[in-house]
Amino acid sequence: QVQLAESGGGLVQPGGSLRLSCAASGSIVSISAMNWYRQAPGKERALVARITDGGSIQYTDSVKGRFTISRDAKNTVHLQMNSLKFEDMGVYYCNAAVLDWSRRYLEVWGRGTLVTVSS
């Protein structure tokens, strides 16, 4: 079984910063990609940032230049969010494409962490 545990959400003023982290654990052989999705109030979940095991990185246009995704060797992905705006508010979900010990390819989701941007 594979789990993702997010942390780092909270309340921040516009222009502020937050750092989200997501740690993967369990019967993991490898993780080909780790992603952050955001679900804003009343909207569908959407991809914010992606990082692959080869180091390829993608961002949605609205966060380019403000957010930075990174991944360490311990299967943890971080999302540094700077210059936060009201429209960045929502529940942030970690997502990973995992190969487990049973040689199954799994798409795993975390439970989400809430980011609130308010003055």
Image (tube, helix red, strand yellow):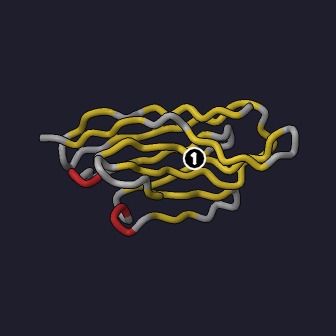
In depth, the one of 71 and 1 nearer the eye is: 1
**Residue 82: x percent and y percent?**
31, 51
**Residue 50: x percent and y percent?**
55, 58
Q: Is residue 81 left or right of residue 112?
A: left
Residue 48: which quarter of the image? bottom left
Circle 1: element type: strand
Q: Is residue 79 left or right of residue 85?
A: right
Query: Mark 1 belongs to which amino acid?
Result: Asn
**Residue 111: x percent and y percent?**
50, 34
Tell me: residue 27, above or below residue 57.
above
Tell me: residue 50, above or below residue 27.
below
Image quadrant containing the N terminus: top right
Tell me: residue 85, above or below residue 62.
above
Residue 116: which quarter of the image? top left
Q: Is residue 112 left or right of residue 2?
A: left
- The outermost residue toward the left is 119
Residue at x 31% of width, y 33% of height: 10
Residue placed under numbered mark 1 in the picture: 95
Q: Is residue 34 left or right of residue 100?
A: left
